[in-house]
Structures are given as structure tokens and as C-alpha cells.
Image (cartoon, rainbow, N blue to C red):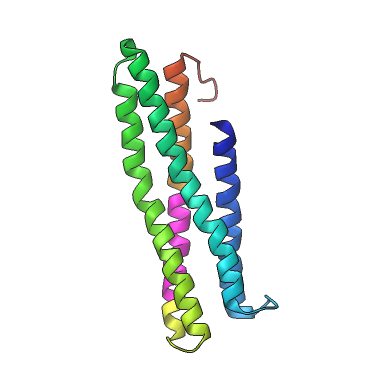
Amino acid sequence: MWFFMILSYVMVALSGIGLLMVGINHYFDFWAQNHITLDLLVSIVFIAGQTLVMFFFVGTGVNIREYLEANPSLGKDLYKKMFAIKRKLYPPTMMVTVLFMVMVIIDGAFFIGKVSEWWFHILYILTLYYFFKATIIQHKSFKESTDIVLKMTGADNTDS
């Protein structure tokens, strides 16, 4: 669990750096190749990072449910909390992923002269906004799911 959580943080950080690189490259052309190669490289990391975050919570939810089924004395309250975390987490995570994909497609379309540059500007700003929003929600969700696991296993959380 901890390995995937740390890997998620690393992938989200790399995604943020990649997102900034795509924006900077659009305006300053620092990438020696063309826009599309950088966009594709960043897309692989970005989508992998967001997918890893979502699957972390899917896996954690399954583990919590199985643990609570094996220990019915703990009740179902912790699983309901985990379900509530996923309801908060998935919409902004999916939104930033979809916005990023559309932004990359529009950047490629602009690069080959098919759409106005304004479409990229609008989508880039929206993607940045949702990236920061999703990252904050993901961080809070990681903390909340860790608290659930600690409560479930009976360990005390001394950080709070």
C-alpha cells in the first residue's frame, strides 16, 4: 500500500512538471523536436499517474471491504467512509485527465494549423486549475484513507 501511495505522489509530481513543460514548450519552443513528441511523452506519464491514483483507491477499497467482511465486529462504517472518499476523488481526477487529453489533441491540431491558438490557451488554463484542484483532493484522500486503514487495524495515528 505504501509503495503505491508514494509512487502515486511521484507520478503526480512528474505529471505536474510535464504539464508545465507542455505549456512552456507551446510558448517558447524549447523542445528540440516538435510539440507532438513532448505532448505524447508527457501524456504517458500524466495518464499513468492519474490512473495509478484511481486504482490505488479501488484496491484500498477492496482491501478494506475484505478486511471488514473477515472482521464483522468492526461494522461497515469504515467502508462507507472509504466510499465517500472515492466519491470526492474520482470526479476531479477524471476531469483533469479528460481536459489534459483534449488539451494535448488541441495542441497538436494547433501545431498543424487546424485550430486557433485560443483553444489551447483556454484548455491549458482549465487543465492547470483542475490539476491543482485534483492534486489537493488526492492528497486529502490519501490522508483520509490512511486514517481509515489505521483505525481498521487498531494502530493509533500520532500525526494528527
Q: Position of residue 7 (x, y in %)?
A: 59, 42
* Residue at 46% in and 13% down: 154
* Residue at 47% in and 36% down: 142
Direction bottom: furthest residue? 113
Residue 57 location, quadrant: top left
Q: Is residue 53 above or below residue 45?
A: above
Q: Is residue 108 above or below residue 57?
A: below
Observer-nearest of 63 and 17: 63
* Residue at 46% in and 74% down: 105
Q: Position of residue 107 (x, y in %)?
A: 49, 77
Observer-nearest of 157 and 19: 19
Position of residue 24 in the picture relative to residue 138 (left or right): right
Specify whether residue 131 is painted magenta. Answer: yes
Observer-nearest of 74 and 47: 47
Specify whether residue 63 is painted magenta. Answer: no
Q: Position of residue 69 (x, y in %)?
A: 33, 18
Per the rendered image, the range of residues in magenta is 121-134
Magenta portion: prevailing SS class:
helix
Position of residue 4 in the picture relative to residue 116 (left or right): right
Q: Is residue 91 above or below residue 83?
A: below
Q: Position of residue 134 (x, y in %)?
A: 43, 51
Numbered label tally: 0
Position of residue 110 in the picture relative to residue 58 (left or right): right
Residue 88 location, quadrant: top left
